[in-house]
Image (cartoon, rainbow, N blue to C red):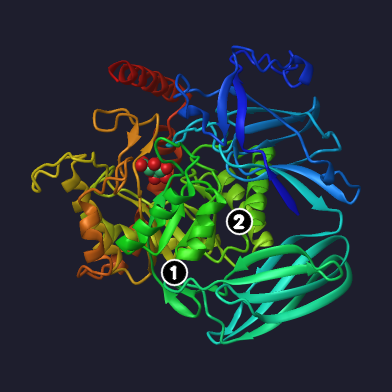
C-alpha cells in the first residue's frame, strides 16, 4: 500500500444556511479559489481554533486541489481517500462525483474513488457538520467541547488489487514463558507470502515462514518460548512483516506486543499477574491546537503521566488519534478506550444502535493490534435502569465481544443502587464524585460496599472521581473552599488512599488529567472550562501533583462494613429505583435549552476576551 498525504493548504468556508449542496459547491466549475468568502486553512485542523469560529457548530466546507503522478495509474491498483478523524457528518466529492459519507467524529473511514480521480487536476470537496442531533453519538448534551472539522490526517491510498486486510494478532499465554501466537488475516485477490517476526530492537528475524497461493481467510500460528512480555513497566514490542514472495514487496508491517488480559473473580490479571490500575482520564484537547495535537505534545502527556506514577489512561469518552496508542505501546501505558454513547441518547432507535455498533467495529478494526489497549467501553453514564437502555448496552457489549474476545468489555456507570446490568459487563465501574457533587469523601468506603452488592464477584474499577480547582487559587486547608487547589488535594488524597484499601477495586482513574473546554462550565472559576484537571489547560501542575507519587500505593485503615453495605442495598434498592427512574434522570442530564443558553454565555465571554486582548 502506498499513501500520499493530502494534508496541507486547503480552502474552506462556513455554510450558515446549508446552501452548498443545493448550489453544487462540490463541482469544480463552481469553485473559484480567489473567492473572498474562502478561508485559507491548514488541514488537519479543528476549525473552532479559527477566529470567529470559536463556538461555531454548523456546516463547514473544505476544498483541496491536487495532482497525481502518472505512475500510480495502473489497473493493478485500487484507490481510496482515508480520513483519520472528521467531526461529525462528513460528505465527500471528488471532481464532482459523490463518493460517500460518514457519521461519527472519532474513528477513521475510507471512501472508494470509483475511478473519479484524474492525473492533473483533482478537486476534492468535503462538507462537514458538527451539529448536535438527538440521533447522534454523542447526542445533544455532553460535557466536552464539540470541536468540528477534518481534525486528523487525510491520505490518498493506493492499494494493490492483491493485498492483505483485517490482520489480527492474538497472543494468549500458556504461561509467562510461552505464548501461542495466532495471526489471522484476509487476502483480497491471491497472494504467495513470506512472513517474518523480529524483535523491535534487532534486525535478524526470530521467526520466518511462507504461505503460497492463498486467497480469502488465512493465517498462521507459532509457539513463542520465553517471549519478552509487554507491560507498562516493560513495553517490549515485536515487528511482523509480510512480503509478496515473488517480488519481495512489503505488503504489511505492524508492531505488536505479547501480553494477555484475564479476569478471575474480583481480580484482573496482566500476563498472569494481578493488575492494579492507577490512572487518569484525558480529553483529546490541548490549547491552542484543539484536537489536532502535535505528536510531541501527546508524548509529553504520556511521559508526564508516567512520571507521576500512573500506569493507565482512559481516553474519555471516545478514541483519540492513533498516534497516542503508538506512543502508549512504546512508552508503556495501558489504554482504556470508549465510544461516545454518553448520557442521553436515542436508545429506542435501531439507527442509533447501528451507529454505535459501527463505531465499535471501526474502533476495534483500527486498534486491535495495540498491546496498550486493554478495554472497550461501550458507553458512559447512561440511564441504565431504563429497560431500553439496559438492552441497548447488553446488545452492544455482545456485539463488541464478537469483534474482540481478548479484551475487557464493559460500560461506565454512575449508579450507586440501580444498575443491575453491571452483571453482564466483564468489569463493574463507577463514576461518583463524593466530596464534590455529593456528600463527603468519608462515604466512599461504605457506599462502595453498597453498590457492589448486585455485581459482587467481579473486579470493580472506580472510573471517575475528582474535584474542580482553578490553578493558582489557594485557600486555608480547613476551609476547603470549592475550586481551591487545597480542596482538590483533600478530595483526591482521601479517595485514593481509600480505594487502595478496597480488595475488590482493580483500579481507579482521576477525572481528569487536564482542564478542558465545555460550554456547560461557566462560573467565575470555570470560565468555559471543566476545572477538574490535575494540570491546567496550560499544563500547569496543581498542588495534587506533588502528592500523587507519595500516595499512589498508600492504604487508609478501613472499617470492614461489607455486610452492612449489602443490607443497605437490599433495603434501599426499591426506593432508589423509583426515585432514579422517575426523578433523577430528568434533572441530571441538561437539555438543548441549557446548551443554547451556555453557548451564548461562552460567545459573550470569548468576544469580551478578544476585545480585551
Ligand atoms: C461525569 C462525566 C464527565 C464529566 C464529569 C464532570 O462523570 O462522565 O464527562 O466531565 O462527570 O462532571 O466533571
- Residue occupied by mark 2: 397
For the residue pair 138 and 33, the one nearer the viewer reads as 33
Please tell me whether residue 37 is drawn above or below residue 594 in the rendered image. above
Which residue shows up at 24% across the image and 69% down it? 555
The quadrant where ligand 1 appears is top left
- The first of marks 1 and 2 along the sequence is 1
Q: Position of residue 221 (x, y in %)?
A: 73, 79
Q: Is residue 112 visible?
A: yes
Mark in the foreground, 1 or 2: 1
Please tell me whether residue 92 is drawn above or below residue 498 in the rendered image. above
Q: Position of residue 99 (x, y in %)?
A: 78, 33
Which residue shows up at 62% across the image and 64% down it? 369
The C terminus - image quarter: top left
- Residue occupied by mark 1: 232
Q: Tag count in the figure?
A: 2
Q: Secondary structure at mark 1?
A: loop
Question: Do labels 1 and 2 touch, CB within 8 Å?
Answer: no
The N terminus - image quarter: bottom right
Q: Residues within 10 Å of mark 2 (few under 14, many from 20)?
A: many
Quarter of the image holding residue 305? bottom left
Please give left or right for residue 128 compared with residue 123 in the image: left
Please give left or right for residue 410 compared with residue 564 in the image: right
Amino acid at each position: 500500500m502506498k499513501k500520499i498525504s493530502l494534508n496541507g493548504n486547503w480552502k474552506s468556508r462556513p455554510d450558515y444556511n446549508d446552501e452548498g449542496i443545493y448550489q453544487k459547491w462540490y463541482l469544480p466549475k463552481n469553485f473559484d479559489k480567489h473567492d473572498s468568502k474562502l478561508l485559507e486553512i491548514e488541514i488537519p485542523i479543528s476549525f473552532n481554533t479559527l477566529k470567529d469560529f470559536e463556538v461555531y457548530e454548523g456546516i463547514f466546507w473544505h476544498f483541496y486541489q491536487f495532482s497525481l503522478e502518472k505512475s500510480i495509474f495502473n489497473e493493478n491498483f485500487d484507490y481510496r481517500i482515508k480520513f483519520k478523524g472528521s467531526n461529525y457528518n462528513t460528505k465527500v466529492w471528488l471532481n464532482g462525483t459523490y463518493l460517500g459519507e460518514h457519521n461519527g467524529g472519532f474513528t477513521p473511514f475510507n471512501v472508494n474513488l470509483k475511478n473519479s480521480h484524474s492525473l492533473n487536476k483533482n478537486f476534492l470537496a468535503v462538507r462537514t457538520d458538527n451539529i448536535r442531533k438527538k440521533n447522534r453519538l454523542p447526542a445533544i448534551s455532553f460535557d466536552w467541547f464539540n470541536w468540528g472539522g477534518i481534525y486528523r490526517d487525510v491520505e490518498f491510498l493506493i492499494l494493490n488489487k492483491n493485498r492483505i486486510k483485517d490482520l489480527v494478532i492474538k497472543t494468549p499465554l500458556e504461561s509467562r514463558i510461552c505464548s501461542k501466537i495466532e495471526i489471522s488475516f484476509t487476502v483480497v485477490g491471491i497472494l504467495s507470502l513470506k512472513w517474518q517476526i523480529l524483535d523491535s530492537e534487532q534486525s535478524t528475524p526470530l521467526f520466518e515462514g511462507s504461505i503460497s497461493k492463498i486467497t480469502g481467510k488465512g493465517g498462521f500460528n507459532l509457539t513463542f518460548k520465553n517471549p519478552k512480555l509487554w507491560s507498562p513497566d516493560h513495553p517490549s514490542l515485536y515487528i511482523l512483516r509480510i512480503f509478496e514472495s515473488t517480488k519481495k514487496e512489503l505488503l504489511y508491517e505492524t508492531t505488536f506486543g505479547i501480553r494477555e488480559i484475564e479476569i478471575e473473580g474480583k481480580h484482573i490479571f496482566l500476563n498472569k499477574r494481578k493488575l492494579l490500575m492507577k490512572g487518569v482520564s484525558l480529553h483529546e484537547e490541548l490549547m491552542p491546537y484543539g484536537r489536532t495535537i502535535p505528536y510531541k505534545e501527546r508524548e509529553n502527556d504520556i511521559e508526564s503521566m508516567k512520571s507521576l506514577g500512573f500506569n493507565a489512561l482512559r481516553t474519555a469518552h471516545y478514541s483519540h488519534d492513533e498516534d497516542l496508542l503508538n506512543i502508549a505501546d512504546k512508552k508503556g501505558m495501558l489504554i482504556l478506550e470508549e465510544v461516545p454513547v454518553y448520557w442521553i441518547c436515542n436508545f429506542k432507535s435501531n439507527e442509533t444502535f447501528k451507529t454505535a455498533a459501527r463505531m465499535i467495529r471501526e474502533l476495534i478494526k483500527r486498534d486491535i493490534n495495540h498491546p496498550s489497549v486493554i478495554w472497550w467501553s461501550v458507553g458512559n453514564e447512561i440511564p441504565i435502569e431504563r429497560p431500553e437502555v439496559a438492552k441497548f448496552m447488553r446488545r452492544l457489549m455482545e456485539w463488541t465481544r464478537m469483534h474482540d474476545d481478548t479484551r475487557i468489555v464493559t460500560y461506565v456507570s454512575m449508579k450507586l443502587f440501580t444498575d443491575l446490568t453491571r452483571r453482564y459487563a466483564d468489569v463493574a465501574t463507577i463514576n461518583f464524585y463524593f466530596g464534590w457533587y455529593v456528600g463527603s469523601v468519608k462515604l466512599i468506603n461504605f457506599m462502595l460496599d453498597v453498590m457492589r452488592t448486585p455485581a459482587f464477584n467481579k473486579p470493580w474499577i472506580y472510573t471517575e472521581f475528582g474535584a474542580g480547582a482553578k490553578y493558582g487559587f489557594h485557600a486555608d486547608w480547613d476551609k476547603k473552599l470549592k475550586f481551591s487547589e487545597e480542596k482538590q488535594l483533600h478530595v483526591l488524597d482521601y479517595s485514593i488512599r481509600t480505594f487502595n484499601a478496597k480488595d475488590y477495586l482493580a483500579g481507579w482513574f482521576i477525572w481528569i488529567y487536564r482542564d478542558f473546554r465545555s460550554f456547560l462550565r461557566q462560573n467565575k472559576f470555570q470560565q468555559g472550562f471543566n476545572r477538574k484537571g490535575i494540570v491546567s489547560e496550560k499544563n500547569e501542575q496543581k498542588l495534587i501533583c506533588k502528592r500523587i507519587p507519595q500516595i499512589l500505593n498508600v492504604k487508609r485503615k478501613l472499617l470492614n462494613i461489607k455486610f452492612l453495605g449489602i443490607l443497605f442495598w437490599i433495603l434501599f434498592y426499591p426506593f432508589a429505583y423509583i426515585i432514579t427512574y422517575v426523578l433523577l434522570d430528568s434533572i441530571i442530564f441538561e437539555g438543548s435549552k441549557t446548551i443554547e443558553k451556555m453557548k451564548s454565555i461562552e460567545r459573550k465571554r470569548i468576544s469580551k476576551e478578544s476585545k480585551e486582548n
